[in-house]
Image (spheres, rainbow, N blue to C red):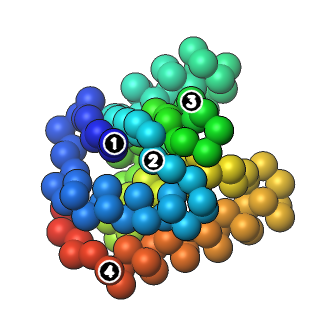
Amino acid sequence: MINFFSETDFELSNTIDVSNWIHKVINGYDKKLGEIVYVFCDDDYLHKLNMSFLNHNTLTDIITFDNSLGSILHGEIYISIDRVKENAKDFDTSFLNELYRVVIHGILHLCGLKDKTEKEEKEMRIAEETALSLLKNNYTLDNQ
């Protein structure tokens, strides 16, 4: 089960398509969907989590808490809508494209991908692009 919550005025409008896409990506890594919770928030909210749980005094676009049991994925994924908007501008892409990239980034972490080294980061980017192409080719995306 995938649940979407918001601590801001942002609300994801196409949750069924996004959930189906996430489920398909998870299956592609031979994992099973347990319970995943997304929380859309602002920079302040995510910064407080970053300080409290990770002792990082930085802004970030996403924090993923992995509670998986074996191959069954469980987790909480917090996404700063402020950072997504800023990153979309910085990377010269649409808000939705950047949002979906971050949404799947958290799932890829739950599937076991990392991004601490240059090699891992490159593998993560390839996995993100592969997942994004699956989304664009198979689902109806609403403008937000």
Q: Residue at 60% of width from left, 60% of height from top? A: 30
Q: Is residue 135 above or below residue 11?
A: below
Q: Which mark is residue 138?
A: 4
Q: Is residue 8 above or below residue 49?
A: below
Q: Residue at 28% of width from left, 41% of height from top? A: 4
Residue under label 1, please give it: 1
User: How far apart are the two marked residues, 4 and 3, measured between alpha carbons?
Assistant: 29 Å
> Which residue type carries mark 1?
Met
> Circle 4: is it few (<14), some (14-19), or many (20+) Cα within 10 Å?
few
Q: Nearer the viewer, mark 1 or mark 4?
A: 1
Q: Is residue 98 above or below residue 15?
A: below
> Which residue type carries mark 4?
Asn
Q: Quadrant of residue 100?
A: bottom left
> Which residue type carries mark 2?
Leu
Number of numbered discs visible in the structure rendering: 4
Q: Closer to the N terminus: mark 1 or mark 3?
A: 1
Residue under label 2, please give it: 33
Q: Are marks 2 and 3 in contact (CB under 8 Å)?
A: no
Q: Quadrant of the C terminus?
A: bottom left
Residue under label 3, please give it: 67
User: How far apart are the two marked residues, 4 and 2, measured between alpha carbons?
Assistant: 20 Å
